[in-house]
Image: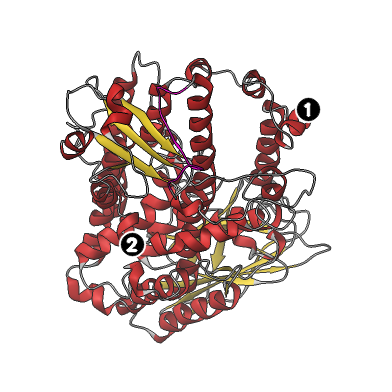
Amino acid sequence: MPSYTVTVATGSQWFAGTDDYVYLSLEGAAGCSERHLLDKPFYNDFERGAVDSYDVTVEEDLGEIQLIKIEKRKYWYQDDWYLKYITVKTPLGDYLEFPCYRWITDEKEIVLRDGRAKLPRDDKTQILKQHRRKELEDRQKMYRWKEWHPGFPLSIDAHSHSELPRDIQFDNEKGIDFILNYSKAMENLYINRFMHMFQSSWSDFADFEKIFVRISNTISEYVMQHWKEDFMFGYQFLNGCNPVLIRRCTEIPKKFPVTTAMVECSLERNLTLEEEVKQGNVFIVDYELLDGVDANKTDPCTIQYLAAPICLLYKNLENKILPIAIQLGQKPGPENPIFLPSDAMYDWLLAKIWVRSSDFHIHQTVTHLLRTHLVSEVFSIAMFRQLPAVHPLFKLLVPHMRFTIAINTKAREQLICECGLFDKANATGGGGHVQMVQKAMKDLTYSSLCFPEEIKAKGMDSQEDIPYYYYRDDGIKVWEAVKSFAEDVIRIYYENDEVVCEDVELQAFVKDIYVYGMRGVKASGFPKMIKTREKLAEYLTVVMFTTSAQHAAVNFGQLFLGMYPDEHFVEKPVKEAMAKFRKNLDEIVSTITERNKNKKLPYYYLSPDRIPNSVAV
């Protein structure tokens, strides 16, 4: 009688194992096996991290195995089980891999296909077509769109983390990490001890140093020593945590009437300000978005303020970017003077502090929250709703969506909700942050997420003119590596543009993002459909880059780019493409490491060994 060897791998997360009854059945092209009991209470199989093997004997050969059904029946209490994968050795000695990487909860069953990626057109039998259709129908019931605030990208329909599908919730280890990281941050910042500082005026600049007294690394110590200096202020626009706002100034705005006479002592080329602008030596950062945003009024005892400044910067003969003029509001006039480096020391320093404060608000709410977290959640929901697990693009993208919906749901529960941390410790809390996202949506365009295009649109693309813009240099290298990887995968599964056009699941994924994520706004520039392999490569690069590198550049990393512990792909050509991708990333790491040697301010935020695969923090 034919016998199949079945190997079952359980996850290594805490509480990933199970003591429930577990049954397996095989479905082949020539027939189906009976239901086989693999595990029952106290057998000590399917423990955390275990790999267990079983022989399944059948009456007749089943032909090519198409599906595996796993059933879990509760013994005593709810005992969720994380199944990584199943391999099957056929009577002929062939090996088939069935990736899962999912939780099996309650008394449920899951049906797995083998790990070979397939487009919709590749499924010829009715049973495979039906399985594909049912998976998406079930997912669309679980992953529902919901409007959290008017004008926002739509998010997941869940009020709390516990309401999310089990497969996208934090596992226990990640949950503990979340708590420990939060506690560590609180300890580092002495938050309990210095909370009163955030709720009242500070009387001394030395208070800043007290906040950083527990943070000890070379960069923070260097910044603490030099934060008052103009070169450090300018450097942060290029390589700080918000290096996306600075742009080359092509004309001095009428609302910011800076003259040559005002800044003459800062110009080093014996040129007028207008001539410096024409030569490309002047840059500008405009915080117009903050104009009209309501300051936090949740604590009637604490008056909070917001500014909407404009800052003019100048590239000196040493190629350093230095501030030369600051206006704290959008409307010029006697009540809104232009501050200059030649002003009294503390007047100029306070003007820079106001700019840095405004930069913080834009960074947290727009650069970080909207343009990485919320956008990545849109990508994630659309992927789960429209791409089945067997689709090659699901396998490509799913590592970049890990825990994204979970972290955003936690944020809506604890951070950006009413009476959350934003309301307690942020001048844009109490609704200002909501206004900011609503206003910023008009600038959230497809082209602005295409890294090289956005850099060029800001006039910041010349390495010769702006040699120390490491965010640009490293970002373009990573973008090209990600795009090359996407192109390699596309070539394996899409032999021509016609196949791209015919992929109804891909087109549904793209449409979901446009309709629900971008709210169907034509001006966003997001495509409604993809017609060519070239455009598909760019689109996938936008998704993967935004969820990994762009988030890393404005946040910090943990699980690294190019490392895929869950093996959703099983085909050799894709694994070769992954190896090539990792090799390209390693070369970028080496280049960045060499450049950073002996630098007092090394830039490593976009070093691939520090880029997490997904928005998970």
Residue 91, picture quadrant = bottom left
Label 2–label 1 contact, CB within 8 A: no
State the image coordinates of residue 520 (x, y, percent, origin top left).
Answer: 41, 76
Name the side, left or right, on which 443 lies relative to 41: left
Q: Nearer the viewer, mark 2 or mark 1?
A: 1
Residue sitting at the far right: 76
Does the magenta run of residues contain 392?
A: no
* SS for callout 1: helix
Q: Residue at x 21, y 65 (%)?
A: 533
Does the magenta run of residues contain 336?
A: yes
Region in magenta: 332-343
Please indicate, yes or no, whether residue 7 appears anywhere in the rendered image: no
Nearest the camera: 211 or 555?
Answer: 211
Nearest the camera: 273 or 451?
Answer: 273
Q: Residue at x 72, y 27 (%)?
A: 190
The crowd level at tag 1 (other Cα within 10 Å; few <14, some 14-19, many 20+) is: few
* SS for callout 2: helix
**For residue 498, above or below residue 566:** below
Nearest the camera: 450 or 160?
Answer: 450
Name the side, left or right, on which 533 lies relative to 209: left
Tell me, for residue 193, which label it has, or none: 1
**For residue 482, above or below residue 311:** below
Q: Amino acid at mark 2?
A: Tyr
For the residues labelled 2 and 1, the Cα–Cα distance comes to 44 Å
Tell me, for residue 446, which label it has, or none: 2
State the image coordinates of residue 174 (x, y, percent, origin top left).
Answer: 63, 45
State the image coordinates of residue 349 (x, y, percent, origin top left).
Answer: 50, 25
Q: Amino acid at mark 1?
A: Arg
Tell me, for residue 94, which label it has, or none: none
